[in-house]
Amino acid sequence: MHKITKDYRTQMMALYVRSLAREYELLSSEIKRTVELFPQEKDQGFGATSGHVA
């Protein structure tokens, strides 16, 4: 019984680690895509000129 429980816990931990790795991969690619699409110029799209504070 102890071996079955140990094997189950090991398998569940392996599944958990794989799930975390996949989630990390998805979030990393989403962040990378967001950064790449973010406007490069600071004032782009806001209609402000440099030096003006609202």
Image (cartoon, rainbow, N blue to C red):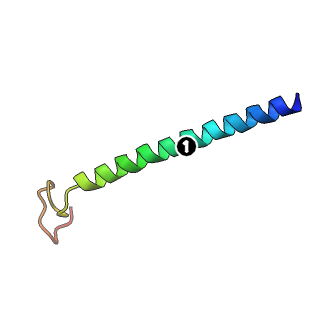
Quarter placement of the C terminus = bottom left
The x and y percentages for residue 22 are 49, 42
* Amino acid found under the numbered disc labelled 1: Leu
- Secondary structure of the residue carrying tag 1 is helix
The x and y percentages for residue 42 are 20, 64
The x and y percentages for residue 33 are 29, 49
Q: Is residue 30 above or below residue 15?
A: below
Q: Is residue 36 left or right of residue 1?
A: left
Q: Hey, which residue is sitting farthest bottom in the picture? A: 51
Q: Observer-nearest residue: 40 or 46?
A: 40
The x and y percentages for residue 48 are 13, 61
Q: Which corner quadrant of the image does residue 38 belong to?
A: bottom left
Determine which residue is flagged by label 1: 20
Residue at x-position 29% and y-position 55%: 35
Q: Is residue 29 above or below residue 10?
A: below
Residue at x-position 61% and y-position 36%: 15
Q: Which corner quadrant of the image does residue 6 belong to?
A: top right
Q: Which corner quadrant of the image does residue 39 belong to?
A: bottom left
Q: Observer-nearest residue: 17 or 39?
A: 17
Q: Is residue 11 left or right of residue 21?
A: right
Q: Is residue 26 left or right of residue 13?
A: left
Residue at x-position 14% and y-position 58%: 44
Q: Is residue 23 left or right of residue 11?
A: left
Quarter placement of the N terminus = top right
Q: How many C-alpha atoms fall within 10 Å of the one at disc 1: few (<14), some, or many (≥20)?
A: few
